Amino acid sequence: MGEWLATVRFENGNIRYARYSTVVESVLSGLYMSVCHDGPRARPAGEPIAGRPGDPPAAVEDLVAVVITVDPDELTWHAVYDPARDLLVGPRSSHHRAALREEYHLIGGHLTKGPRLGLCGRAADGDEVPFHRPHWLDHAHLDAPPPGSDLPEIDLFAGWAGGTVCRDCLMATI
């Protein structure tokens, strides 16, 4: 299996590391504190931090925004970390962003499946942000823009710290 180094950057400047699989295109492991260089390739060193998945999760407002970058192509996406359990809670893949665009609409900062009710259960009021990009095989949306149209690229998890997207809606997707 092909594995690369994933670097997890915290807003406070801290850095941790993880293993990333090129086969499943996802972060595989818990987080590591250090890295070793094996020729031109870097990989996490030592044992992963012993996360506590059985502990109660942190409240949504206590989750921390992180940025994940994968060697060697610098593939980057935003994610969240649970400090109460010392775990990366997701998303573990950059493909999550595309899946969100295909499955949900963005209305008033909430993710919806079409009706004006966010995944969090609260009303989604306001105008729909041009975000939804149906899968090219989805014939139910004939009035939707064709794939590859000029919809803005919106990384919903990048809005985590700024509160521009409902955190409860985002957590319902991972």
Image (cartoon, rainbow, N blue to C red):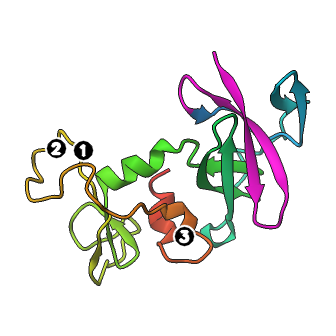
Which residue is depicted at the point 31% across and 79% down? 123
Kindly tell me whether residue 172 is visible in this rendering.
Answer: yes
Residue that badge 3 annotates: 159
The residue shown at (48%, 63%) is 156
Tell me the residue that label 2 is attached to. 138
Q: Write down the region rendered in magenta.
A: 1-25
The type of residue carrying mark 1 is His
Q: Left or right: where does residue 60 sit relative to residue 127?
A: right
Disc ID at residue 102: none
Q: Is residue 109 left or right of residue 20?
A: left
Q: Say if 59 sits above or below 122 in the image.
A: above
Q: Which residue is mark 1?
A: 135
Check if mark 3's residue and mark 1's residue have beta carbons within 8 Å: no
Between the C-alphas of marks 2 and 1, the distance is 5 Å
The first of marks 3 and 1 along the sequence is 1
Residue that appears at 56% across and 48% down: 91
Three-letter code, disc 3: Gly
Kindly indicate whether the residue at mark 3 contacts the one at mark 2 (C-beta within 8 angstroms).
no
Residues at marks 2 and 1 touching, judged by CB atoms closer than 8 Å: yes
Residue 112 in the magenta stretch? The answer is: no
